[in-house]
Image: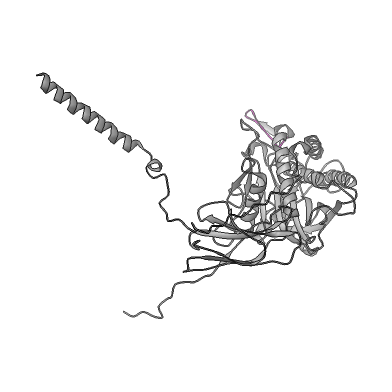
Amino acid sequence: MTKHCSRCCTYFLNYAVFTLAVFALAARPATAQRSVPRDPTESARGKPHPKILARPAGSVARASVDEKSMRALIGKLVACGTRLTLSSWEDPKRGIGCGRDVIAARFNEIAKDSNGKLQVVVDKFESTSERTSSKPIPLENVYAILPGSDTKMAKTIFIVSGHFDSRPSDVMDPKADAPGADDDASGVAVSVECARLLSKGGANGRGSYRATILFAAVSGEEQGLLGATRLLEWTKQQGYTVGGMLDDDIVGADPAPGAPHRVRLFSGNGEIDDADSPSRELARAVEEIDGRAAIRMIFRIDRYGRGGDHYPFYKAGLPAVRFTEPLEDYNHQHQTPRTENGIEYGDFEKYLHFTFMGDVARDNAEALRQLALAPSPPTNAKLTGAVTPDAKVSWTAEDDSERAGFEILRRETTDPRWTVYAFSASPGETVLKGVSTDNHFFAVRAVGKNGARSIAVPTEIERRPPPQPASTKQ
């Protein structure tokens, strides 16, 4: 009897162990069973190990952002009552003209402290849209321009912009109050603070940046992006090439617990393959400069069903992105101030989060600083090497004594970000031994001796459609 019971115990013990093992294997996640990708290794031998130059010294310190002056500017803009584009341009106390005067006065104060470097321009024009009753109306934009120091690059311009017009619930009502603290006095405050942060320094009427920087406050956004469309036209008239456009619109509030959070950065794909439009490359550059802890890239042109002042630039094929706060409260956008059913509506200053807004100002200023210090991007970037074991990347570039060379970038087709694969001191063709043209996307960017990078230029690929039959018969 004892012997029989011993066999039974052994049987049940083995069965229990087996059952537990089966359940344990079933419970293991798939990643634990195959934690290492089972792909062949590319370019295992001879893979380059490029030296990565440090980013430019002298970054904009967060402590240098003046939140008090940003708050004061927004308070003065809100005190104009309304800044609807259809309101008065002549009344110094109420209407959009009041807003223009507040901004121009602040830019002029900053220009005075810049030792003559910053140039303030009030650009007057006319425009028409459905929201002007299809009639031409007068508009004005305010610009502060920091000329570039490099004779070759001074006609490349980097822009930061906010719109100073506001709106009530009825976008055609010029009499209703429209404080517009967040939409978009916050963006104007960011643009103006960037001007203060970046225009400091010596005299000579020029900044220390190779390219020109323009700090803009535009009107007519709520009437159909009228001021931004004009700004694009103005840059062309002045002979500028737009190196990048940063639109700051609704960047002042961050009401969710745990604030300040990351700012959202919207960029469109464009009309080309592979998510590599100039706007997308600008977004990647901004995130790399400011860090993933500060920037949340959103891979779409704008918020769903919405639009902003970067859009005319984006549609023109230029690098243009939009900064917007992490989580919008629609009770405080596009609302005539009122209280209904115990809910307060209206875009008031009391809903703003100035620590978050100061972070956005710093991130914009640092991105502008590094982009304006960088060499010009390369041109004619191409990828060849189809049906060969090696990828061949080529590009051209003008001579530049301040350039250290070029970084050749690649990424998996499913990855959102580039990694540096190789470095070349001069333009031409670089052969990437054993690197598949099929499995990666490639790009090239210029690197200055100061460590500043241009935005990346994705390689164009050879289009080789498969051969088609001349005809078919049944």
Where residue 112 appears, as percent x and y from the top left, is 90, 46
Q: Which residues are magenta?
A: 340-348
Left or right for 222, reference 75 = left
Is residue 207 in view from this perspective? yes
Q: Residue at x 53, y 59 (%)?
A: 46
Q: Furthest residue to the left?
A: 1
Q: Quadrant of the N terminus?
A: top left
Left or right for 257, reference 375 = left
Left or right for 445, reference 90 = left
Check the image and report above or below for 75 versus 432. Answer: above
**In front of the other: 351 or 131:** 351
Check the image and report above or below for 30 versus 340. Answer: below
Magenta stretch contains residue 179: no
Image-quadrant location for residue 278: bottom right
Where residue 443 appears, as percent x and y from the top left, is 60, 60
Q: Quadrant of the C terminus?
A: bottom left
Where residue 336 appears, as percent x and y from the top left, is 70, 38
Is residue 134 in view from this perspective? no
Where residue 83 appears, as percent x and y from the top left, is 78, 44
Q: How was this image coloured?
A: one colour
